[in-house]
Image: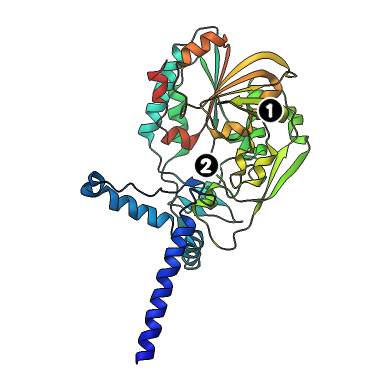
Amino acid sequence: MRTNKKCTVFIIGGLILVLILGQMWTAGKGFSAMENRYLAAMPQANWQNIRSGAYMEDLETYMADHIPFRDQWIQLKNSIERLNGREQIGDIYFAGDHRLIEVKNISFEQLEANMQTLAAWTKKLPETVHTEFLLAPTASWIYQDELPAYALTYSPQQALEIIREALPESVYFVCAYDELVGHKEEAIYFKSDHHWTMRGAAYAYQALMESRGESVADIMTREIRCMSEEFKGSLYSQAPVFGYPQEQFWVMDSPGLHAVWTAEGKSATVLMPEMFEKKDQYTAFMGGNYGLTRVHNEAAERQETLLLLKDSYANSMVPFLAEVYQEIIMIDLRYYRENLSELIEQEQIKQILCLYNMDFLCTDQSFVWLKARS
């Protein structure tokens, strides 16, 4: 009996020691590569935080973020749920052929507010400025037939009509859905990430140029290069399971890949091969997202400047746009807080392209800065 008690004490003591050592080992890890986010920092223990209860809440979050082998525990939990037949983890659905599809909680109210703000802003632009809007469909729209019947809780066609009706006649609207859905069997979206691939971006670019009366059919015959055999994107990070296969990351040949971008004191070529050594490999296109990014290509077809209002879907299309425009000024409203109208006047902008994906338009709240800073 005494021996059993001693074993129990040793086991409990060993577990406590493992947890303490694990906490010490993970305490220095400020960033989770698996989840592509910063982990909670150790909360500050002061009287105000302790009295309000904020300290204990933050400490609980910190302990959860720094539990030993946290990534493996999450994978184990998700894998067991998958074995039990679960098709959904969070906003992520498991479709056929290892495809992960994100289905967000769409708000038409937010979509209408964003489009009204954008439309009002475009109406104030000088008559000399030509504005286009390119809508990027998300994988949940393209592959909705692979989702359970109850998964998509909104009508993409209804959302499309809201966008069409909101935009004034002065804005030329292009939807890339028809172009992309006709090639859905090709690798136009990553299976483990919410972005389209460079091939998907190329089809959308083709739709844009054809709407201008310019043919770029030869773009799909270009050579492609595999930059990575070990890509697992943002959707996998949200719903990791054991045994999920890695996928390849391809880029299409484009002179625009060698254009130079600058943002926040940083500078590099549009394609950054060194980023394929990191977890978030989509940042190989210009290192990620910034409030204002300038892309310059001295050998571009036209000595013109394009103002590009965008989300991250635009990053993989920039190489093609950089073939045409000598200068591209990219604005991401999530991080840009300056007066956009003043920028248009200073840069003598004549061409604007708005490129946003459907989910972004229905969920993002940064369009309010168009009203506040223009």
Dot 1 and dot 2 residues touching (CB under 8 Å): no
Q: Tell which residue pokes out farthest to the left in this image.
A: 51
Quick one: 372 or 360, which is closer to the camera?
372
Q: Tell which residue pokes out farthest to the bottom in this image.
A: 1
- In the picture, measured across the screen, residue 5 lies left or right of residue 141, that is left
Q: Above or below — where is 354 with respect to 181?
A: above
How many marks are shown on the rendered structure? Answer: 2
Rendered location of residue 276, percent (x, y):
66, 44
* Residue to which mark 2 is pinned: 141
Q: Image point 37% across, 80% down: which residue?
A: 9
Reading the chain from its start, which is encountered first: label 1 or label 2?
2
Circle 2: element type = helix
Mark 2: amino acid: Trp
Circle 1: element type = helix
Mark 1: amino acid: Phe
Q: Image point 45% across, 16% down: which residue?
A: 339
* Residue to which mark 1 is pinned: 320
Quadrant of the drawing holding the N terminus: bottom left
Q: Above or below — where is 74 with respect to 1?
A: above
